[in-house]
Amino acid sequence: MQNNTTNRIVNALSYLSILFLPVIFPLIVWIVARASDDPSIVKNARKAFWSQIFPLFYVIFAILVLSIASLSSTLAHSGAVFGILLTFALLIALLLFIYNIAMGVKMLLGRE
């Protein structure tokens, strides 16, 4: 019983860390849990890590695309494209924020 409660709390904190220590906390839990061979914690920490870092990768990709397009001068309305890419980035970040909160609550309630 104690192990199950501890697993639920660690899994929930991996997702809820988006509020207090995004990306870093799930990464630490993922690395430490791999050594302890607990598949539930490893799986949830990995999912939390990727769902928290994905918006950063998207923003980097969007900036690279916009920079390459601006350098080649083929994109006449780069401001509009940047606005669209930024809007998508914010939407993705919001959806993943809500996902992390929902999964954290789900883990606390024990509904894996």
Image (spheres, rainbow, N blue to C red):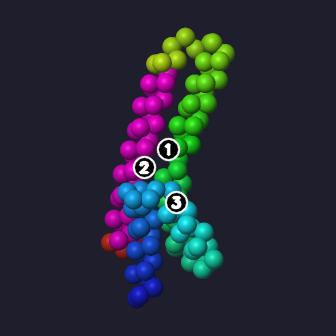
Percent x, y of residue 13: 41, 67
- From the viewer's perspective, is the residue at label 3 or at label 1 nearer? 3
How busy is the neighbourhood of tag 3: few (under 14 within 10 Å), some, or many (20 plus)?
some
Residue ID at (46%, 37%)? 89
The residue wearing badge 3 is 24
- From the viewer's perspective, is the residue at label 2 or at label 1 nearer? 1
Eyeballing the image, is 67 above or below 31?
Answer: above
Percent x, y of residue 28: 55, 66
Q: Are marks 3 and 2 in contact (CB under 8 Å)?
A: no
Q: Amino acid at mark 3?
A: Ile
Q: How many marks?
A: 3
Residue 21 painted magenta: no
Q: Residue most toward the right?
A: 72
110 to the left or right of 72: left
Residue ID at (39%, 81%)? 5
Quadrant in which the C terminus is drawn: bottom left
Q: Amino acid at mark 2?
A: Leu
As helix, strand or loop, the secondary structure at mark 1 comes to helix
CA–CA distance in space, label 3 to label 1: 15 Å
Question: In this picture, which residue range is highlighted in magenta?
Answer: 81-108
The residue wearing badge 2 is 96
Residue ID at (51%, 56%)? 23
As helix, strand or loop, the secondary structure at mark 2 comes to helix
As helix, strand or loop, the secondary structure at mark 3 comes to helix
Is residue 103 visible to us here? no
Mark 3 and mark 2 lie on one chain; the one further toward the N terminus is 3
Q: Are marks 2 and 1 in contact (CB under 8 Å)?
A: yes
Q: Looking at the rendering, which quadrant does residue 20 occupy?
A: bottom left
